[in-house]
Image (cartoon, coloured by chain):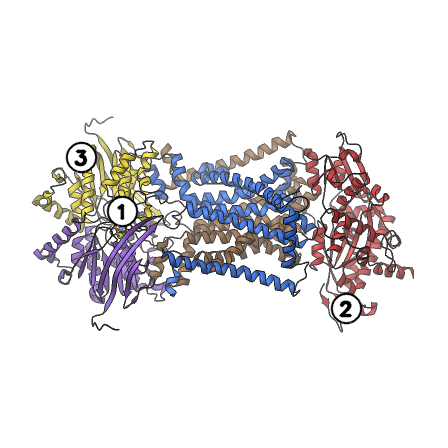
Chain colours: A brown, B blue, C red, D purple, E yellow
Amino acid sequence: MEKKKLVNDKIPRKKKKRHKVWNIETLITISTFTFILLAWFVLTELEFVSSLIMPSPATVLQSFQEVITTGYKGNSLWVHILDSMTRLLTGYFLAAVLGILLGLASGYNRKIRAVFDPIVEFYQSLPPLAYYTVLIIWFGIGDLSKVVLLFLAAFAPMFIASMSGVKNVKTEYIQGAYNLGANKWQTFFYIIFPASLPYIFTGLRTSMVASYGTLVAAEMVAGVSGLGWMVIDASRFMRSDIIFMGLIVMGIISIILDRLLRFAEGKIVPWKGKD
Amino acid sequence: MEKKKLVNDKIPRKKKKRHKVWNIETLITISTFTFILLAWFVLTELEFVSSLIMPSPATVLQSFQEVITTGYKGNSLWVHILDSMTRLLTGYFLAAVLGILLGLASGYNRKIRAVFDPIVEFYQSLPPLAYYTVLIIWFGIGDLSKVVLLFLAAFAPMFIASMSGVKNVKTEYIQGAYNLGANKWQTFFYIIFPASLPYIFTGLRTSMVASYGTLVAAEMVAGVSGLGWMVIDASRFMRSDIIFMGLIVMGIISIILDRLLRFAEGKIVPWKGKD
Amino acid sequence: GNAKSTGTAGSESASDAESEQDLPEVLNIGYFEYIDDSLIVKQQGWLEEELNQLGVEVNWISFQTGRDANNALLSKAIDIQIGIGDPPVSIAVESKTPYEIFWAGQTVGEAEALVTKKDSGIDRIEDLKGKRVATTIASTSHYSLLSALQLNGLTEADVQIVDLTAPDILSAWQRGDIDAAYTWDPILTEILKDGTRLISSADLAEQRHPTGTYGVVHTEFGEKYPKIVELYIKQLIRAQQLYTENPDEAAKLWAEGLHISEEEAAKQAKGSIWLTPEQQLSKDFLGTSGNIGNTAESLKKIGDFLVDQKSLTTKLEVSSYEAIINPVYLENVVNKTNN
Amino acid sequence: MVNLEVKAKVLELKDIQLTYGTKGRDVLALQNVNLDIEEGEFVSILGPSGCGKSTLLKIIAGFIEPTDGSAQIDGSEINGIDWNRGVVFQQPALYPWLTVEQNVHFGLKMRKKEDKETVRYFLDKIGLSQFMKSKPYELSGGMKQRAAIARVLVNNPRVLLMDEPFSALDALTREQMQNLLRDIWRETKKTIIFITHDVDEALLLATKVIVMSRRPGRIVKELLPTFTNHITAEDNSVRFTKEFQEYREEILHLINSQS
Amino acid sequence: MVNLEVKAKVLELKDIQLTYGTKGRDVLALQNVNLDIEEGEFVSILGPSGCGKSTLLKIIAGFIEPTDGSAQIDGSEINGIDWNRGVVFQQPALYPWLTVEQNVHFGLKMRKKEDKETVRYFLDKIGLSQFMKSKPYELSGGMKQRAAIARVLVNNPRVLLMDEPFSALDALTREQMQNLLRDIWRETKKTIIFITHDVDEALLLATKVIVMSRRPGRIVKELLPTFTNHITAEDNSVRFTKEFQEYREEILHLINSQS
Ligand SMILES: Nc1ncnc2c1ncn2[C@@H]1O[C@H](COP(=O)(O)OP(=O)(O)OP(=O)(O)O)[C@@H](O)[C@H]1O
Ligand SMILES: Nc1ncnc2c1ncn2[C@@H]1O[C@H](COP(=O)(O)OP(=O)(O)OP(=O)(O)O)[C@@H](O)[C@H]1O
Ligand SMILES: [Mg+2]
Ligand SMILES: [Mg+2]
């Protein structure tokens, strides 16, 4: 069996077998999480750590129920989620579109790169927390400055990934396109863009991470709603149960978003590893 | 000339020409920054914006000189830079090594992926600011928790990029390796790893961004030195000149780090776009 | 706020009659989530009651730090901020942020204190030499800590000051990373469970190092809409009255607003000293429009402190601090009610 | 404009030299290559592996510039890539995100000359009608090669540059492809430059056969066979003539003496 | 163990069927393929483009499992990839991060049989000594193919599986390669399975020629020529014998009648 297993991932197999293999992996994942939960349970129940430092699963579950039914500080959990998602996805979406376009353009054309790459290189290095103050002074304390922050966090990874994508496009693909009569723009849209898709999807995923990671920072200032705000607010009142609950909700949402991206990737880039 | 320009990036040209082209790009980059500086100068000098919102280049230059000669709050600028870099690079380096190894392993082996991918997916979504509190509880207020935070920020993008790298390795490369007698591990080290290098480098770059972006958050807690701390401290006292100075220093350092990574990429992955 | 320009634009020194026609569409008020008069006003919806009649919307925005409030005022995102401590105000004076103090409702009492671990062997402030003391930089506690050290013959350099937010102070405390902390409720109550109080802000106030919180208004807004400011002051006075007359009712409101228990709220409320309008207008605090009181002095003291610390660059004259104290609004309210 | 030749000279290579420079080690791939090609010629290039045939084709296609010498098309220096010099690569580089049909349609679409009819026609001719909707990675080696040929043929460029286009095809398919190409050439009077390793193929198709020397590649012989004019789909008996065999022997000898 | 045949049966394919399934459209690539190969046989597979030759080779190599039927090596089911069944791919997949020498050395290194001597020997035999330090993307098409062949030969596997290995080579180089392969086969008595489109090549090398039908691929004929035994580097005159021509005609006829 040994040798056969080795190549599982890369070689077409019979449907039946594949399905079974998938089940084993699901089992492993489930076991992993069960183990983590159990460790958590044991650590807190046996009071190895104080409940302030780490609340027990039971407490967290309880505050979960509470927040679901009565909400947190005037807003239901769904409102918090919705508010966060609106901000996040607005910033992320804009960053994705702009990051992909400018990244591809910069990968493709040296002159465009000469303008944007150093700027992105420069600003990407500026920690969001450091320039958030400046953003607030410029854009106020409303949703605008939050969205701008999330946008900026998501933009740089998207830009870098798209640019790398272009640089890794096979020379033959580009030569071939020109040779078949495609002009600059057509080559860009019909060849460079699809050929860069594997990189773009990697970018979309890391960029989601970057943007999501800034959510708390964004909602920290002058917030009244949002998951990030909820977690920060809870931390001020030492409600570690709410913190943990918030983190778990954020984790689950992020897994869903990531799965959606990966699903899209599978649909859109079926030739992965085959060119 | 038109058509020839189109393919500049992808086709070997005579050395002389290349060199000249490079100069044009450098010129563009220089112009871009000159333009930004000029805009900044004009905006602040003509008092379109108050000096509080945006300090003038002169003020910033002045505080720069000041901080270089007398330091900031007891430490010279070099100490701040050194402290930040030590923290950053320790976390980053560990994250790079572990992220690459686990990412590659997870891309390669479904079972390993089943364990780590969901965990990474889950934790990556947790904004550093949200779980930093927890890290402080676990690792204290010293450098350890800071390094752990920087590590965690850098790890996820590295992991994702390496995993994508493996998934994009040509099937033929892997089949070929087994076929020549490589075992599981050898295929991993001699084939999967080098073939994933273009992705790994993209990961190294985005991961540097992510880690750098967390520097301020990391140094916000119990800080007495570091660039991030300097910026945060200045922001509390509304010293926008120091904030801007700090941001510029951080930007320059990040450009240097990024250039080093790109230089390494050029040396290590010369076959980019050629396989 | 956006001006609703009805008729001619109001002149700089608008009389009551004129300003009635000239009102903003929205009033943005920044506040901190802790126990004070303003929270009663918010919970009761008094301001909304008054202003909605006039067609003005009220928008409450909570901040975590004085820095954020300062920035918000600077970007004109808020018109009024309530409960901001002296260090941020001193910083704003230095950086010429255009706002004025119109209210000095509370001074910090037992709500902030310096606490050491019970069995750390530290009994007196002098013992702190070489120890790790946590506080939140640029807060009232920070200033109080420095004052306490100075009063006991120590300087900042004699101790290791660790900059932590309140929740992080608790974590560091529990891990034993710090030997002492100067902080506020609710963390203060928490660490007092296994700690001893060395000195509190009430003690320091007695030794002429008071700290307090203020209501400030963006200068432009105050000049344009003095009536709104006065209206707000009236509600704050009403809240003070509610607290003195019916502390249980007030505790209930705070408990609701902060999601804590009523007992907790009642206890924490006792940590601050409330100042009546008359006290505020006295020599010890804001003073009167002709004769600015000691608040200017204590703000200068803090400002100078921060300069010594190299946090700020230049020591300013008292006059600069006097310039941002504007008791006129409060005087107008007091005079009107007295008449 | 100065010289008054009547017959249109499509391509003129003068003293072409090409050096690949990689990390200190320079490889001289082409040296002193001189070549004139007239409108409507069917040129076949033969030569030992690694002698610079593909490199020469890439210069004509405008993919690379010669290090020295001049390459002119219609009297003016070759200047980048142009669809009128359509290239079939040695290793088919089809786009994996497009179906076979879309790959073949690509050129027309780019030039805003959408024409599915023509695409279908050529797909049928190369025997891939059934695999129209397949992705390139679902094709066999020979099928990929045929799709790559169709992609360029559909585009109807003035000059066809083909780098070993039939090397992965079986005898029958190969003959069919040869006939297809010859018919297209006859009908449209295209100029075709065709690299092959099969001497018979070169003689059966070309009106000019060029034999190159071992690296650094130079042109050692130009021959002008006429067999292609006498061949029809039904009758290729010329290949059994003595003349054909003589040509064959000569070329084989030329190539084999390169070692 | 039940049957007591004396001659070692290396490979036994029984009723092999293979269907590629992609998005609803199933492609039946192989149907009812039965084939026995004995130790030391040199098997050549011929058949029209897209008929399933590469697919069959991949099954033998263990890259894919048949959808139905059984593929046995030495009496036990083929189970994944093994270096003892060394494959030369139809499209050379050299590792671009390794030099030519490192590529060729790869197998030995992996099997902890480092032996630069052998590597040099084969590099010399295939004529790439000069390009030892080059990267694969600096090679011409034919040079890549030769490097890919050397990579597998150096590894000295028991069974050699070659998918059109000589298709990009010029006549002379091709003949040299054929001689090299025949010599190796004679000396080491390897079992070789060799896909080609060149009927002459098949007859000049193989002891068993298999002709496959158009897709879905089935085996339509097995022939057992012996010409390879009479050929030396100096003398390949057997190809001009009548018998050779008859074989040739028969096979060509078989392939051509597949349309
Ligand atoms: N990965 C795949 N997915 C779907 N179909 C495939 C795949 N690989 C091959 N096929 C189909 O299987 C059939 C046989 O392909 P195979 O590569 O075995 O042909 P072949 O005989 O090697 O042809 P050639 O001589 O052109 O290389 C073809 O019709 C092809 O379209
Ligand atoms: N990108 C490159 N970098 C460096 N050297 C190269 C490059 N491409 C080709 N060469 C070298 O140039 C020479 C000619 O290569 P070319 O591809 O033109 O040969 P060819 O005649 O097409 O051979 P084949 O028949 O094997 O395809 C070879 O020696 C090769 O090693
Ligand atoms: Mg070639
Ligand atoms: Mg094949």
Q: Is disc 2's CB within 8 Å of ligand 1?
A: no
Question: Residue, x 53% and y 53% (percent of image)?
Answer: A121
Between C214 and C16, which is closer to the camera in this rendering? C214
Determine whether label 3 and label 1 are within 8 Å by CB.
Answer: no
Residue type pointed to by label 1: Met
Q: Is C326 left or right of C79, judged from the image as shown?
A: right
Residue E127 or C10: which is nearer the viewer? E127
Whether residue C249 can be seen here: yes
Q: Residue at x 32, y 36 (%)?
A: E107
Circle 1 chain: E
Which is closer to the viewer, label 2 or label 1?
1
Task: Give the percent coordinates (x, y) of residue E237.
Answer: 9, 43
The residue where tag 2 is placed is: C22
The residue lying furthest to the front in this view is B69
Tell me the crowding category of disc 1: few under 14, some 14 to 19, or many 20 or more residues within 10 angstroms, Cα based: many
Please name the residue that numbered disc 3 is placed on. E186
Q: Which residue is mark 1?
A: E143
Q: Amino acid at mark 3?
A: Arg
Above or below, C193 relative to C163: above
